[in-house]
Amino acid sequence: MKVRVIVTLKNGVLDPQGRAIHHALEGLGFEGVNDVRAGRVIELDVADSTSDAALDEMCAKLLANMVIENYRIEKAA
Amino acid sequence: MKVRVIVTLKNGVLDPQGRAIHHALEGLGFEGVNDVRAGRVIELDVADSTSDAALDEMCAKLLANMVIENYRIEKAA
Amino acid sequence: MKVRVIVTLKNGVLDPQGRAIHHALEGLGFEGVNDVRAGRVIELDVADSTSDAALDEMCAKLLANMVIENYRIEKAA
Amino acid sequence: MKVRVIVTLKNGVLDPQGRAIHHALEGLGFEGVNDVRAGRVIELDVADSTSDAALDEMCAKLLANMVIENYRIEKAA
């Protein structure tokens, strides 16, 4: 089973990497960019029997810092 | 328009961060993890008029190193 | 002038990437690893006339999130 | 023993994150920035008995992708 975990900074937490990309896109002449946020993605190939609870536990214990980051788990159709 | 760019290393390119996560998940006792790849995600809020060509250009010029990385563009429904 | 900026999470801020590396090193059989912290490094080549104040401003405005991160500026001898 | 590992892309490997920071610094009005490279830093606290060979092995096996990245090991004085 292919699972993707998206880890991004919570709203309100300043994001220096997103800010750098935002400025750079404007500097390159791209118009209409309102906001940019940068984060990490972790793509997992796990046994089909892996439970949602186990995936949540992976995120909480290892993949994300839940004080400053959000995570979302997406499963391939 | 919300757009998400997922940047991951191409297949065959060694991924130290994914490898570290893989080992760590096993060390924490999670079973059935076959593979882990780590990457970056860039979440953009852009004008609805932004063309696909402009998004591709952002990726090729700034967001990804196309020699070693793949990118995927995903638009929110 | 070569300048290096080291950006790390402040003490007390959970560091998922450092934790993953720590577990992985142990899983690979490396002994005596007490702690691991992960961060970013930005290597700058700037005009010799660049002031320390300008470097600090680059860090505060763009390179680091001073709420959760520390930065250190190191100049090559 | 405090050890720092600096991992950066090899010369010649395009560095999207460094490029974004470079453009952003210019966009913010900072002058005299010739080049920017982005990388990772891993700060280790290891037993004093840890050999240089063990540190090199940590880098080669886990911390860096030696095809596209360089690493430097720095020990605190």
Image (cartoon, coloured by chain):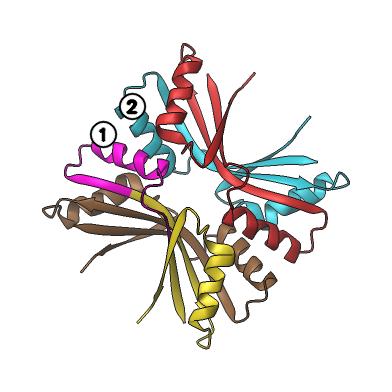
Chain colours: A yellow, B brown, C red, D cyan
- Camera-nearest residue between D65 and C48: C48
First to last magenta residue range: A7-36
Magenta stretch holds residue A32: yes
The reply to whether residue B47 is visible in this rendering is yes
- Camera-nearest residue between C19 and D77: C19
Residue in the picture at 39% in, 32% down: D22
**Pointer 2 with pointer 1, Cβ within 8 A:** yes
The x and y percentages for residue D2 are 76, 40
Residue in the picture at 64% in, 48% down: C37
The x and y percentages for residue C36 are 68, 50
Residue placed under numbered mark 2 in the picture: D26
Residue A15, picture quadrant: top left
Specify the subunit that label 2 lies on.
D
D10 lies left or right of B73: right
Residue placed under numbered mark 1 in the picture: A27
| Image: C63 above or below B37 | above
Q: Amino acid at mark 2?
A: Glu
Q: Amino acid at mark 1?
A: Gly
Q: Dot 2 lies on which element? A: helix
Residue lying at the far left of the rendered structure: B49
- Camera-nearest residue between A64 and D26: A64
Q: Dot 1 lies on which element? A: helix
The x and y percentages for residue A9 are 42, 53
Residue in the picture at 49% in, 24% down: C45
The x and y percentages for residue B62 are 33, 44
Residue lying at the far bottom of the rendered structure: A49
- What mark, if any, has residue B46 been given in the picture? none
Residue A5, picture quadrant: bottom left
